[in-house]
Image (cartoon, rainbow, N blue to C red):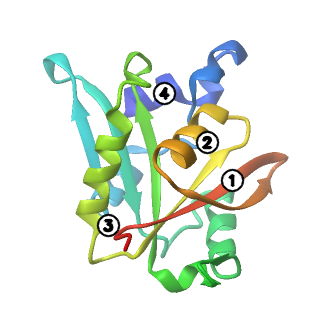
Amino acid sequence: MLALQEACYIGNLPPQARGSGFLSVRFSRRQFSRMMDEAGIVVAAGAGGVIAGYLCAASLDGGGSSPILARLVELINVVEYRGAPLGTFRPFLYGPVCLHETLRGQGLLPVLYAQLKRHVAGRYGTGVAFVSLDNPRSLRAHVEKLGMTAVCEFSVDHARYALLAFDVNPD
């Protein structure tokens, strides 16, 4: 997972390669381990056991590990979703999601998403995610393909993000 993350991290990509998607935040082995223990990680294995993609979930209880996550935690208590503050819906943090570049657009993301929703059902009511506004491919995938709702936009250190929300068990 760490190798795939590094291959997709914005700071490691030349500007011309960012159009196919990128990660805005890096996570350590310890942070991935904590996500696995808290809410879970769904992993897709490719040929030879190589990780083809992953989708993480995490509790928002200790969300201040980065400026972006700290801002997101602040927002969920004031931004409305379905007529109430987002924080009232037992939210969890969706992401990061990372797919090997050769598998993007091949239908893997909806499979990982459905599996993650099954995994967190009963423990969480709503997922929240953030996507860089400089990452239109990821934003389209999450809003148009997965049906997430863009709740608001926010900025951290001159970078702009969309805050997305979705129901774990839609009616």
Q: Label 1, label 2: how many angstroms apart (C-alpha)?
A: 8 Å
Q: Is residue 121 left or right of residue 5?
A: left
Label whose residue precedes the other's in the sequence (2 or 3): 3
**For the residues bearing labels 1 and 2, Cβ distance under 8 angstroms:** yes
Depth check, front residue: 10 or 123: 123
Q: Which residue is mark 1?
A: 162
Task: Tell me the quarter of the picture where residue 97 sits.
Answer: top left
Instruction: Tell me the element at label 3.
Output: helix
Residue 80 visible to the viewer = yes
Label whose residue precedes the other's in the sequence (3 or 4): 4
Q: Label 1, label 3: how many angstroms apart (C-alpha)?
A: 24 Å
Label whose residue precedes the other's in the sequence (4 or 2): 4
Q: Residue at x 49, y 71 (%)?
A: 60
Task: Tell me the quarter of the picture where residue 37 sits.
Answer: bottom left
- Nearest-to-viewer mark from 1 and 3: 1
Label whose residue precedes the other's in the sequence (1 or 2): 2
Depth check, front residue: 103 or 24: 103
Q: Is residue 32 above or below residue 150?
A: above
Q: What label sits on residue 139 in the rendered view?
A: 2
Q: Which residue is mark 4?
A: 6
Instruction: Tell me the element at label 2.
Output: helix
Label whose residue precedes the other's in the sequence (1 or 4): 4
Q: Amino acid at mark 4?
A: Glu
Q: What label sits on residue 38 in the rendered view?
A: 3
Q: Amino acid at mark 1?
A: Ala
Q: Label 4, label 2: how many angstroms apart (C-alpha)?
A: 20 Å
Q: Residue at x 62, y 15 (%)?
A: 17
Q: Residue furthest front?
A: 171
Q: Residue at x 61, y 71 (%)?
A: 73
Q: Amino acid at mark 2?
A: Leu
